[in-house]
Amino acid sequence: MNLFLRRVFQGGAVVGLLLGGDLALRSVRAHSSAGGEPLEPGEFVARPVVTIEGHGGFETNLEGRPEHYAIDGQFGAVLEWGLPNRGSFAIEAQIGPALVWGEAEHFYGRVHVEEGAHDDHAETDGEEHGDDHEDEHADDHGDDHGDDHGDHAEADGESHAGHEGHGHGSGAPFRRTDIKGFVQARYQPNDRLALSLSWWPYYVTGNQGEDSVGLKNEVGAKLVYAFGDGDLNFALGDGLESVLDGLFVSVENRSGWETDGLFIGNYTDPWLGFGFFVDQLNVTLTAGPRFYSPGNYSGLSQRTDWGGEIEMEYPLAESVVLFAHWKPIYSTAGGEGWGKGWSHHVGTGVSFSF
């Protein structure tokens, strides 16, 4: 089984990335037949999985530089069936609490539109959306997973309309405990190609700041093709002549909705990736354009952003993996309620499989 192909998908987009990127996007080799031998055709494995991640988002492209923090605990299982040609089919599901500092997790590129501007878009959106969308923030999990994901409070401590609790001490005060989940179906017909469909539900448990009670939704589809076998380890003497073994390409498309059904936007990431080992340390690098289409509510045009992600994993034991990731995204255009510049999502945690 191609190690990096397995890794890129298993967190569900597990890394998405935080990320992208967040927990549900966290790629964990221990989730499956674990970077070891592939399952035989017809063989079945069920593995309980527990993942704990702390992560933060920093919107330096926005006025006030909002930020958010969260600690997620996800509990679930991975069901995997072996297929011919070293392939497999897997279903992964996780759910658990998310302790929120700042604002609830949301889809990449959410734009704050003033009340009057909503009137201009009422015919296309069908309804007005007020304080629920005060700030815009980058995703992350997802990303990965990723890759990526989190809502963010104002970092400069100033008071803003609709920002309850801002300007009193921390720019990202503790809010509440929400519930987040992750479901993915992954089909890998051979050791080079894999496809997945994913759903990231997120339930906001209280009305605070821009957050309102209800279910946020994010869905995505991803395709990954690996050029080599993924078995590239510089600590074992592999050199530049073996680089092809670590190269892969991925194409991911995601869409997101707020709790009131507002369509936030859609993006497609056609990214080039490179993965390698240094002894047991697994490093994955990805980068490329992000073709982003904001929802009609925003009044913004389509644009091409740029981004990448650095992910690292280190196994402490056969069933315990430490991970960390950083996902910067550069927005190439600004507008009302949105800014040109960088946003970042970082996270670290540990995953257990049994």
Image: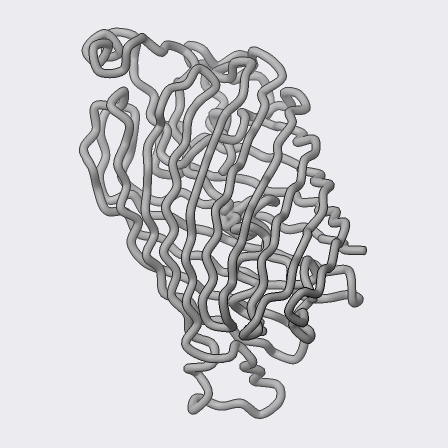
Quarter holding the C terminus is: bottom right
Q: Is residue 147 visible?
A: no
The image shows residue 39, relative to residue 295, as above or below, that is below
30 relative position to 116: left or right = right
310 relative position to 332: left or right = right
- Looking at the image, which residue is at 59% across and 35% down? 69
State the count of labels: 0
Q: From this viewpoint, which residue is outermost toward the front?
A: 42
| In the foreground, 230 or 82 | 82
- Looking at the image, which residue is at 20% across and 10% down? 123
Q: Position of residue 349 (x, y in %)?
A: 68, 50
- Looking at the image, which residue is at 56% across and 46% down? 184
| In the foreground, 211 or 88 | 88
Classify residue 308 by image quadrant: bottom left
| In the foreground, 10 or 196 | 196
- Looking at the image, which residue is at 47% across and 62% down? 194
Q: Position of residue 127 (x, y in %)?
A: 31, 8
Q: Is residue 327 visible?
A: yes
The image shows residue 16, relative to residue 65, as above or below, that is below
Q: Position of residue 51 (x, y in %)?
A: 71, 47
Quarter holding the N terminus is: bottom right
Classify residue 232 by image quadrant: bottom right
What's the colour scheme? one colour
46 relative position to 157: left or right = right
Q: Position of residue 141 (x, y in %)?
A: 51, 45
